[in-house]
Image: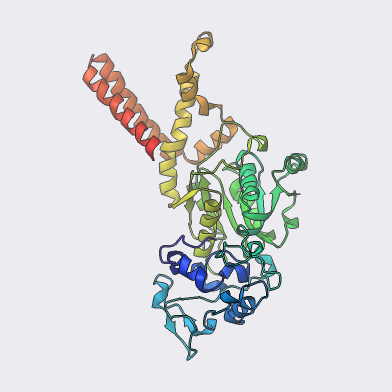
Amino acid sequence: MICGIRPWCWCAANSDGLRRSIPSMAAITGRTGSPCCWGEEDWPRDGCWARRIQKARNHPKIPSKSRRSWPPCCMCWELISTRRFPHQSVVRSGCRPVLPRRIFWRRPSVEQPDAGWSLLEPPELRYTARMSSDFPPELRDKPFLIETLAVYGVGLLGGSVALAAKTKKVARKVIGVGRRADRLQAAVKAGVIDEICTDFSTLPPSTGLFVVAAPVNAIAQVVRDSIPHLPARCVITDVGSTKVELAESLRDLTGDNGTLPFVGSHPIAGGDKAGFEYSTADLFEHRTCVVCPGGARREAVLQVNGFWQALGMKTVEMTAADHDEALATTSHLPHVAASALAGVLPETWQPLAGTGFRDTSRVAMGPSDLWVSILESNRGPVVRSLKTLQSQLGAYIEALESHDPKRLFELLHTAEEIRKQLETD
């Protein structure tokens, strides 16, 4: 997870001063993000984080000028509420902090081996967040967010997720999961993934995130089949373009703490080709990803947000119902409209189809079997969007039949302005 997703994160607002004061939390624990971004369940009752900081500070590779101070004992601080600002914490014991009380730290997690995050002690300090310039270059590596990333379905989207995670060093190891070993081996040979897995039971205990890039009508079953074999702290997400039906089918999968182990997500990116051969590391750059928290624990939601942001995306959280209603118009309707447009072209006129027709109907080249499952799983919103489009087309028909150029201009000009606005967003 990445610090700064939540507005109440003090460390994000004071990152410069923080880095001048003490080393990064991630540098000591192997976790990314700052302590105030972590959930209550991550705090162990044993162990003192402050002593770990002190131990790291005294490491010979750390310049002496950077060893001046470390945070107070982690047992001395308490956060009254996760919704309050960190400076509203209270001192629980008589320990006198070295740093000002406004600098707040929560105790970090000491992750188990199956959590997907590594815990590193000096002298093997491996920094997973950029440090201030007074630290040696070898201790200021680019961040690794996940020890092991598993991707089910190494096609265009799944392959691009794997390739982006490898290229941006978001994951130390990427495993491709699927049923066809020959396709997965080809993906390894192409450098898209590092290893293959055809049986969920062979996934390593270091798996921290499991991304399901399957057709929307298969995601729920993949999630159900994989859960018994994944580490307890592993987070599961998907790339499906519909969410309500999926959320309803997974509603019964609640953990001991009453939360789902699944966080829905939809990276709004793709193409009209299928297969990992067309995957690219920059497919998600400057695109938007919708995250649907559902009943998942907040820490898991933050981790999924952080993962997509690390791949270059902007994230927005929505309910499953709001997502499906919006995507019916912005994604599903355009595909149906493009397919309908392509369907009215007689074969004898195909040589006359110019760039306008080709550009407008391009998305109709998407795999038909995939789009059948998408449209079927979002029937209601898609039908409503089609009726809205039908009404809009009726307005054009009426303007033409009544010889009303003023009305025709209004319709065209309104559409022109809306389309121009998209270019500036």
Quadrant for residue 155, please give it.
top right
Task: Estimate the x, y position of residue 371 in percent, counting from the top left.
Answer: 54, 34
Task: Estimate the x, y position of residue 85 in percent, counting from the top left.
Answer: 39, 71
Against 89, residue 169 (above or below) is above
Quadrant for residue 204, please give it.
bottom right
Can residue 355 be seen here? The reply is yes
Q: Residue at x 55, y 72 (%)?
A: 41
Nearer the observer, 70 or 299? 70
Residue found farthest to the top: 348
Task: Estimate the x, y position of residue 251 in percent, counting from the top left.
Answer: 52, 57
Nearer the observer, 248 or 347? 347
Image quarter (top left, top right, bottom left or bottom right) of the N terminus: bottom right
Specify how the rendered protein is coloured: rainbow
Q: Residue at x 26, y 21 (%)?
A: 409
Image quarter (top left, top right, bottom left or bottom right) of the C terminus: top left
Against 151, residue 116 (above or below) is below
Nearer the observer, 258 or 197? 197
Residue found farthest to the bottom: 94
Q: How many marks?
A: 0
Nearer the observer, 116 or 261? 116
Against 205, residue 310 (above or below) is above
Q: Residue at x 41, y 63 (%)?
A: 7
Q: Is residue 359 left or right of residue 200?
A: left
Task: Estimate the x, y position of residue 86 in percent, counting from the top left.
Answer: 42, 73
Can residue 256 be seen here? The reply is no
